[in-house]
Amino acid sequence: MNVLVTAGPTREPIDPVRFLTNRSSGKMGYALAHAFIHAGHHVLLVSGPTDLDVPDYVDFIPVTTAAEMNEVVAQHIGRMDIAVFVAAVADYTPVLTEAQKIKKDGDRMTIELVKTPDILGSARNTFGFGGTLVGFAAETENLEENARKKLVGKSCDLVIGNDVSSPAHGFDSDRNEVVLVYPDRTEFISSAPKSEIAHDLVDVILEIHRTKESS
Ligand code: C5P
């Protein structure tokens, strides 16, 4: 199977020395890429900047901004059977990137932002992806409800939600606790190392793919 995994944060430049980003470590996405390799599949990992080692045997394309991630996904998703969007893509990017370092002239400053491309939301309609589509939802409240909105709104087969308000799980933690939101039901995976959760998720995603193929 050919599997695309997006991972990590994106960085949206404000000027040559500053950027907007978020707290994603990339650990969950890298663990998933590793688990798909372990299960014998081909993986293309498209990742924003992280401190992690690239798992052995994955094809790796590093990117910095949401726009770059969008371009790489658009280019490669057509040959994928499964696409798993784990990346914490910045929702907004500066309208202008200053060519020189911004000086601290005033007491206040405003940076105008514009929405980034919704990569997961483009998968079905814009990129024409017909394979198994999995999204993630990092939330601080109403986890299941927000994950279900994403599932329906972005035509996913599964959305995996995690509560990032808990310090023991989510961002930068080695453990996670997730909710699996399917079109017809919801399941929970209780707290476990991200590597273990990744192996469970690979089994779940491959099962969804098999069911889809045979229907
Ligand atoms: O950021 P948000 O919680 O909406 O992300 C939900 C899902 O959408 C994640 O799977 C994320 O990788 C994906 N996403 C994306 N492009 C964006 C924003 C989010 O692919 N611009």
Image (cartoon, rainbow, N blue to C red):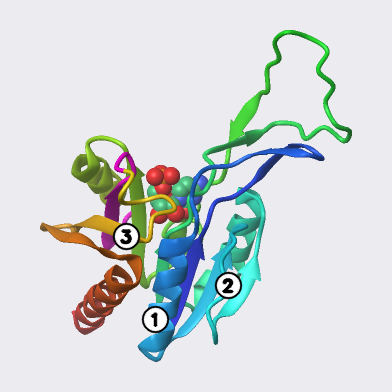
Position of 165 relative to 4 (above/below): above
Q: CA distance from mark 2 to mark 1?
A: 16 Å
Question: Between 17 and 136, which is closer to the camera in this rendering?
Answer: 17
Q: Say whether residue 121 is visible.
A: no
Q: Callout 3, which amino acid?
A: Arg
Could you tell whether 69 is left or right of 142 in the image?
right
Q: Callout 2, which amino acid?
A: Asp
Q: Identify the residue position indicated by label 2 in the image.
A: 53
CB of mark 3 near ligand 1 (< 8 Å): no
The span picked out in magenta is: 154-166
For the point 53% across and 78% down, which residue is it?
Answer: 55
Mark 3 touches mark 2? (CB < 8 Å): no
Q: Earlier in the sequence, mark 1 or mark 3?
A: 1
Q: Earlier in the sequence, mark 3 or mark 2?
A: 2
* Category of crowding for the residue at label 3, using alpha-carbon neighbours closer than 10 angstroms: few (below 14), some (14–19), many (at least 20): many
Q: Position of residue 2 (x, y in %)?
A: 45, 82
Q: Which mark is residue 7?
A: none
CB of mark 2 near ligand 1 (< 8 Å): no
Q: Position of residue 51 (x, y in %)?
A: 59, 61
Tag 3 secondary structure = strand
Q: CA distance from mark 3 to mark 2?
A: 18 Å
Q: Position of residue 147 (x, y in %)?
A: 26, 47
Q: Identify the residue position indicated by label 1 in the image.
A: 36
Question: Between 104 and 206, which is closer to the camera in this rendering?
Answer: 104
